[in-house]
Amino acid sequence: MTNDLYEPHELEPRWQAVWAAERAFEVPNPSPGEPEWEERSTYVLEMLPYPSAELHMGHVKNYTLGDVVAHFRRRNGWRVLRPMGYDAFGLPAENAAIKEGGQPRAITERNIARIREQMQRMGWAIDWGREISTHTPEYYRWTQLLFLKLLERGLAYRKESLQNWCPNDQTVLANEQVVDGACERCGAEVEKRSLEQWFFRITDYAEALLDEMELLEHWPERVLTMQRNWIGRSEGAEVVFRVEGTEIDLPVFTTRPDTLFGATFFVMAPEHPLVAELVAGRPEEEAVRAYVKQAQTRSSIEREEKAKDGVFTGQSVINPVNGEPIPIWIADYVLMEYGTGAIMAVPAHDERDHAFARQYGLPIVQVIAPREGEVDVQTEAYVSSSADDIMANSGEFTGLPSPEGKKKISDWLAGSKLGEAKVIYRLRDWLISRQRYWGCPIPVVYCEKCGVVPVPEAELPVLLPEVSDFLPKGRSPLAAAEGWVATTCPSCGGDARRETDTLDTFVDSSWYFIRYCDPHNSTAPWNRELVDHWMPVDQYIGGIEHAILHLMYARFFTKALNDLGLLGFREPFARLFTQGMILARGAKMSKSKGNVVAPDELITRFGADAVRLNILFMGPADQDAEWQDTGVEGTSRFLGRLWRTVLEAIEKPASSDVTPLIRKAHQTIAKVTDDIDRRFVFNTPIAAVMELVNEINRDPDDPGARFAAETAVSLIQPYAPHIAEELWQRLGHERLWQQTWPAYDESMLERETFELVVQVNGKVRDRLEVSVEAGEEELVELARFSPRVAALLEGKELRKTIVVPRKLVNLVV
RNA sequence: GCCGAAGUGGCGGAAUUGGCAGACGCGCUGGACUCAAAAUCCAGUGGGCUUCGGCCCGUGUGGGUUCGAUUCCCACCUUCGGCACCA
């Protein structure tokens, strides 16, 4: 403590050791009745990291943001829960094991040790007593239990269907993990395969996921919009068409029941299960089979890029509104995955149907017309859905405004039992099984006699066995662990085989935030009373890339667990802040692009405080920011200046005078507090403290210098806790992280004089130092007769005067 | 195509409720200290004109509202993000 140079490498580890020894940021769980139970408590959480080999800049930004919020709240009197853990199952560790040899477990645990050390080097104020990792049996035991609870409730189920298959990773993917027809993880083009898989019935919660967004007042609108788009609620009607001369009913979904009279043909997806039956034994059978076969070879991207094509089945359906037969076609522009896999085609009012009708010379009948003007539906579909549209050629409904027609036709269909109003969603059930090794085993067995049997709770966890070959072969590597797979049926005791697929890692991370509240519970996933005490998370912080995936799954889980009576709340994250990405050369940092900036090297060069300060000083935290190598140098230089300024100020006596520096210090407290607390912005507080430090240096002899220096140290602490702690101690105080956040004196924000801006015709012409006591008339007089303004006004007539108290006077001539 | 966000100096950005555009930082220029360099400190730094008093222009483009617009309204351009053969 004799060193007068700012040496982060010496002081940062020293303070980190103090925090660890004093368990400074650990918050024990209170029990009901204890005084702590009644204290204000808050839960600040950032998305947990996947333990890759190195911490990256995104982590630095994420966890520094959380750190500022946590420190700020702690110093404002809250008990702050701020845990950390690892999303440790997943493909990268498994792929590394394949490439380099070794076990995914060993690789993961090595990475965790490394990343934990790096987090500690950053000085983040984390409750390390609550650390969890999703790959440990102590954790995944409960993941398995929750799976069983959902299974029991009917929210987990198995079905065979056409699924997304990544040929590279050799596993199925959830809909959410397919981006532009490619695997989100590796970029390989996704294939469709019909497979029997496990699902969570997230579609049961589609309506709740939309409606309960109301509880999410502090979520970015952008994220809510993305989730809304993803859920894709559509209101319309289901209409049943009967195949002429048969008993076969084909329901379709339409958002435009008002166009029903304009349906001139009918289209089924090639994958529709009734296609074969419809054409069996007919002359068209062979052509239809050929078309269906060809469609199967085309990827969804190819399907979309080619011109629309299809094939006639020779069969017709009856349009229920007018009894007219219309031909059934098979075409791959109709998707089996959406709606019923069949559509009524209204070429006059749908671009796709129009294109198809033109291609095959099918009739186009206009049934919707604009209130004014003419449209020619033969050349172009009229797809407006305006309230001003009128129905035409629609029997008894002709002449009705289109919105009214929608309702009337829906009612008529319902009355005639030919259909009903219906809401459908784009959202699919969440496919949760994966044909890979490094994940949580699904706790069920298959028995010849009893079928699918859940593993009894008492036998959990189903441990993930050690295997030696992780190479994906289209089935889980677990299938090769014969001794593990072979088991007995919990129900009948006979021979049975274990499920060999593992759970999607998004299942692991859909409940980790709950476990943090009670991380060492060995008899239950959590104690509900404790969870309800801490949760929901008051402030969640993470990357926008999880806007749909993790954030929607976690919302679903919370609602389902609430319905199971395991939780007392419906939404996991009350407030959400999505940080922008750190870019380098305009792109996301990645090894393949070779533009990665390693935080570790920067800490070595400049210290953690400078890195922390820089990442938040770069710009608004919710926006993407381009990495600048000179940035850390700048914040490091500032810390050096702060260091010298404070050491100089220590020599000075405290003063009770109200000086310009004292005022400036109070103004800075007000600014920083408002920015962090109300505005939730993190770059401008740093600028404000820099200004304060500059101000001290401008007039080091001001008797307020010591107070101003102490204030600067105290305000910068959430950002740069090590240097702040060191300087605070040198200023003769103890334990800044426990000190109450500084308060400002309202009266100090006021000044005796202010700079009056004098405008003539809206242009600034003069600035005058004026007493705040001056009345409006006095201000106008002062403005008019200031020499510069008087010259401009000379010979002109003053037409109007605008006075903004304590700001400006505008003279209009 | 639909929905959303954003365009401000050489660069990152600030301006919170319609009231001084460019805080703070980077970079650059000049100076001090030094044998020299680094570090540090001081001064300057939107553009144009200037008789050195100032003047004019300036927040993507064009209009509008207003005494006054980076801020509000309309149209357009550009960039980014989401969704998209979704019936």
Image: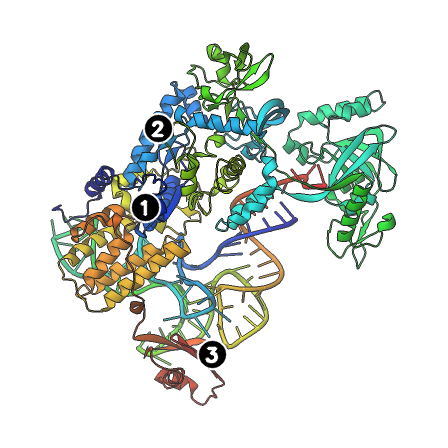
- For mark 3, what is the residue? A761
Chain letter belonging to callout 1 = A
Which image quadrant is residue A711 in? Answer: bottom left
Which image quadrant is residue A297 in? Answer: top right
* Residue A698 visible, this orientation: yes
Please state if A658 lies on the left or on the right of A366 as rendered. left
Do marks 2 and 1 share a subunit?
Answer: yes
Q: Which residue occupies 40% across, 83% down?
A: A780
Q: Which residue occupies 75% across, 45% down?
A: A256
Extreme residue in the bottom direction: A795
Q: Position of residue A568 (x, y in %)?
A: 48, 41
Chain letter belonging to callout 2 = A
Circles 1 and 3: CB distance less than 8 Å? no
Task: Point out the tag, 2 or 1, that comes first from the N-terminus.
Answer: 1
Q: Amino acid at mark 3?
A: Asn
- For mark 1, what is the residue? A35
